[in-house]
Each structure stands twice: as structure tokens, then as C-alpha cells.
Amino acid sequence: MNATVLKHLLASSFVFLLLALVGRAEPHAPAADLIPVDDVEHTYVPTIKDSGNPVETPHLYACAIAPALTRRRRRVVLYARYSTDQQSPRSIDDQIAKCREFLDTLALGEVEVIIVTDAAISGEHTRRPGIDRVWELIESGGCDMLIAEDLSRLYRHSTRAMQLIESAVDADVRVVAINSNIDTDEDESRWRMGSHFASMKAETDNTETRKRIVRAMEGLWRDGYAVGALKPGYIRIPTTPATDREPAKGPFRDQKDTRWTPVINRAYEMCAHHDMPWVIASYLNDAGFPKSRRARLEEWTETNVIRLIRDPINRGEESYRVLRNVKKYSIGRSVQIPSPANQILYRQMPHLAHVSPTLWRAANQAIDQRNVNANPSRGKSSPLHHSNRDSRTALSELFVCDICKAKMYRRSTNYKCADSLRLKTLHRANGSRCWNRCTPQRDTVHRNLARSIVETLVSQAGYFEALCAEVVRLVEQGAPEVGRRLKALQGKDAELKRKRDNLTKAIEDGNDIPQLVVQLRDRELERQRVQTEIEELVARSRSKVPVPTTDDIRKILDDARANLLGDFDSEAAPLLKRLIDGKIHAVPYSRFDSGSLHLRAHFTLNTVRLLPQGWQQLLDDRASDESLTSVVTSAAMPVVVDLFKVPKRIQYAKSMFELVHGGLTLADASRRLGLPETTGNKAYRTGKAMAEQGLDDAYTRVTDMPDRPGRWRPHTDKPDAFEAA
């Protein structure tokens, strides 16, 4: 062995000894924490040969000053949060700066910093985007240390805060809450006790703060100041105006925005005239009426309209504590539930009234009349508890089986008679099972109904023009019927007043007081109803019904078409309930050549109900006018709609048969109708069979269960194809 080889062997032995010493200095460093250093250059000496095999040995000096492997950088998560949008967003930057200062004092060397934040979210919420990211990093091993300014920044929920700290310790993640003096690298008894006390204090601080806020809000309410969110149609005025140096300060007082008073009045009038909420919502959107700042959607919806009409502030009466917050501890959030009647506060604010009390009552009574179930069963007591929400569609209250009158229930992608399914909450009480097991496809039912109604309305454009001409004539004539009705109600009011006075005198004389008090209360309630009706008639006689134009009719038809052909479930429901008299009956039909059963919809379409409610009210007031009888009667139109896809050979059967009998060949007749010759041939044979049996329709109505009903399987309409059945 020559001197050169010996020299390199000694150098290699020194390197191995040095690495062994480094390994003993950090015995607990896992192998996964050792990574190559990118900025260190590895130097190698020229290759030498030993027994013919090339050997590479690292240079002595390179190994001495730059080891090939080193520990990876530590990953440190800095978390910051503030609670509400009324606080300064700079709070995040200040918290992160404080965490960085603390991190610098630890002298950890080069670290990888991960910043996670939650803006304008309460620490009571157990699920937040930022804190969920922290959990993900801890559980996946994506961090080595978690630093927050205070434990309350992580959570104001004692249970969840301890779960986070304990999960971090289990994952070898160090947790530091600077102001709370919590560091999990210290003695276990110290950080555990400190965490329990700090998390409980953070939670109770929020509870006490909430109580102080409620006390302050009640004080503002007593003094007549604004409380709660600003309502649509109002502006908020500060008691201390803004200056060059200071912004405006509260407490605040609300004031009605007179620019929107006509719009709000018009919305109430439409509701009092029984216009549907979606129509009023469309009007408010077109008028540009702004919603509350906290609204999630810019557009008005049916629910928003009902809340606007129900709000007593529009008649000059404010309410407070209608809903109360109840905390759900498992999620850290509060939910609103109705308050008991004796806890709701009211105050009279006549300067905030947009509408008269009479108009407010009339609009709310119109909503009450549509609400047939004023006190519905909720929660577990509801018959719909645990039922499939997907079944509550636009047709859920309209679509019934013609055989048993049970509801047609939407199940998956098909409709089916609920009585044939023996559904617990929907089937008949007599225990029998309906034989109508036809299952029309949902999309086919919706599409065919919508198209049929739209085609019917479009075909009635001339009828609407004639009806509008009658409305114009009635507007010019005046309202003699309203005057006669008003006179009769005034006489009834005088009679009820006389009865009330007699009962009051009898009570003063001391005769059978309990029974007389009950009668007096009944007379007072009856008189209030009569007076409300008198006020409505007076307001109606003074209001002017707008004269309809051709553009009005065109807009009405366009809106109806858009609602029916759009999202059927959400948009078409109120319009269908308005236009259809009674129910949509699902009637079974049998095809003449196969006996297979299919459903057709039978219903009556009342086109008058498409008109604005003011025009309808005018027509109702003139119901005795003989010239209107024929016009209004013709508005009710019976409609029959196929709820299945009719085969091409059935659709063109009569046309093909007539063309061929007219002298055309099968090929020419098929080309004229745009059919393949094979389909045209089958259509001709079907038409010939129908003619031989004297049938105008290939489908015959079935009222009794067939002996051998064909095809009870669910209908799955195939894509369009020029194939016969």
C-alpha cells in the first residue's frame, strides 16, 4: 500500500469519526430531519484505483467545514384573529408583529414562518377557516410550533381550546400564548393549569361582555334611540355630527327616507290586492329599492317581501326582542328563536310611518288569508319530520292522483301516487292501496306543464287585450258597487255600536256581568272587522287603478314565461298556485295497441289571475255587470297535457295516414313531415289501425284497474330519436 492510498484512508477515517461525533451530539434527531444543504458545495478528489475499481473519496477540508447533511428548518405558525367588522383590521398586523418579536427572542435560528388569520370572526365559533387550517397543519405534521398573542385569539371556548393544545402536544408541536404565559415546553402541571384558567376566563369574559351590551341596548331603547340593524327605507342620524377632526358619533336616531315612501306604499297596496310576493319582489328590484346592509343577496326575494310587509315599523310602531339568541355550545354559535310574548317590547314612533295603519292591516290580512296553517307543527311534531326535502316541489300542493286523490309524490327522478307507495304520512286512512302505479319522469312533467301553460297564455294574447279594454271602460265608469257596499257596512257599524252601548249599560246595572262581558268583547271584535273593511273600501274608492296598455300585457306574459321556463321548483310554484283552479289531476291513459299505461295532466287554467290584483279587484267589484260575464267566464280554460314522451309513430300517425290517402307515397309523405322512411311507414300503419277502430286519439282514459296492466316500471324517457315504440 503506497503513501497516497494510506493518506486518503486516514482522511476517510477522520471523516467517519467526525460524523459519529455529530450524531452523538444530537442522538434524538430523526433521520427524516436531515436534508442536503443547497448552498454548500461538495468537493471530491480525483479518482484513485484500488484493485482495478474506481474509488471516490471526499476532500478532507470540504468535510471538515461543510457537513453533507443538516437539520431542516423549523416551521412556526403565527395565528391572529379579531372578532367583528367594527374592529380595526390592523389588529391582525399588530398581533403578527408581537408574535415575530417573541419568536426572535427564542433564537431558533432560521425558521419557516406560516401566517394564519381569521378576520371578523368570533373566537366562540368552533369552526373557522383559519383555525381549521391550524388543526390541519398540526394533524398532518406541517408545523413544529404555534404562537398566538393570547389564548383567547385561538378560542373563546374552553373545551375546544384545551382540545387544540392537547392535540398539539401529542403531535410534538410546541404551543405558546404570549400574554397568557402559556408554553407547553414548560412543566406540564403549569401549562395545563394555566390553559384551563385562561380558556375559562376568555369564555366568561365574552359572557359578561354580552350582558353589558344587552344592558346598554335596553337603555338606548328606553331613551328612544336606534337599536339593531337599519331597516330598508330608513336613514340613521348621529346625535353628534362629524367635524373636521372627529367622525360622527352616537347614539343614533332613525329617520324615514321619504324618497322610498311611494315605493313602500305601492308594495303594501300590491300585497293588500293579493299580488303574490314574487310579483312584489320583482317590482322592488325594478324600482331599485335597497335592502339592508347585512343582506346576503342584493335582489329582493319572496321571504324578504313578507318580512317587509310584516314589519310594524312601517306603520310607526317599533318592536324589540322579537327574537332572542340561544347559544349552542357544541358549535359555539348562537341561534335565534322567537321570544315569549311578554318579553317583546314595543314603542310608538309615528314619525317613522311609511304607510297608514289601515293599509298595513289590509296587507297583513292578505298574507294571513294565504297562510291556511297559521300555527304549523314544527320539529319532531311535524308530519314532515325526517321526510325527504327533495319532495317539496312546485307541484307538492297541486299534483294529485285522479284515482284516489292522494298526492303525487316525487321520489328520486319520478313522480308516483303516494297511496300506491303506502307512505306513512301521505296515504289514505282507509288502508287500501291505489292501483295507479304510473311513474312519470320528473323533468318531463315539469317541462311539458311549463310549455303547455306558456303556449296557452301566448295564444290568449288577444283575449287579454279585450279584457283590458273592459278594465279601461270600468275605470271610466266609476265604482257604484263600492258605494253601495260602503253604505251597507256603515249601517252595520252603527247597529254594532248601538248593541255595544246597550251591553255597557247592562253591565253597569250589574246583571249577569261575566256573560255580558264576553258578549261585549265579541261585539267589539266584530265592529273592528267592519271598520277595517270600511277603511279598505274608502281607500279603494280613492285609489286610482292604472289604465292597462299593450306594453303592460306584453310584460305580464314575458314575466310568466320566464318564471315557468326558468327554475321550475323555485320560480313556478307561486305562479302555478295563482293560475290553476283546484288541482292538477294525474289521469291514467291506456294506449290502444299495447295496453301500456301513461299519465296525462288535467287542470283548469284561469288566465284572469295573471292580471295585476288591482285589475282583478275592479273586475270583482263589477261582478254583476252582464257585459263582463262572458269575458270572465271564457278565462277558465281546461287543459290536458301529456306527462310522457309520445313516440314519433304516434305523433305523426294521423298526418301520415291523411297524406298517404291524399295520394302521396310513403316516401314523399315521410319527407314532407321530416321523418325517416322507416318511421313514416310505422306511423302510417298506426294511423291506419286507429282509423279502422274509429279512434281520434291513440290513448284512452282509464277509470278502473285493467285486468293485466302493462308496464308498471318507472318511466325513463330516452333521448329524441326517430324510432317507433
Image (cartoon, rainbow, N blue to C red):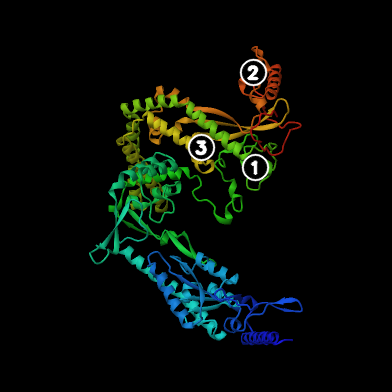
Q: Which residue is mark 1?
A: 418
The amino acid beneath tag 3 is Leu
Disc number placed over residue 7 in the picture, else none = none
Q: Residue at x 72, y 25 (%)?
A: 593
Q: Residues within 10 Å of mark 3 (few under 14, many from 20)?
A: many
Q: Is residue 258 above or below residue 116?
A: above
Q: Which residue is mark 3?
A: 564
Q: Residue at x 39, y 24 (%)?
A: 625
For marks 3 and 2, the one nearer the N-term is 3
Residue 477: quadrant of the picture: top left
Can see residue 179?
no
Distance from the alpha carbon under mark 3 to that under mark 1 = 25 Å
The answer to whether 333 appears left or right of 410 in the picture is left
For marks 2 and 1, the one nearer the N-term is 1
The amino acid beneath tag 2 is Ala
Q: Secondary structure at mark 3?
A: helix
Q: Which residue is mark 2?
A: 669
The amino acid beneath tag 1 is Ala
Q: Residues within 10 Å of mark 2 (few under 14, many from 20)?
A: many
Q: Nearer the viewer, residue 337 or 653?
A: 653
Q: Nearer the viewer, residue 556 or 325?
A: 556
Q: Residue at x 51, y 47 (%)?
A: 373
Q: Secondary structure at mark 2?
A: helix
Residue 662 drawn at (x, y percent)? 64, 12
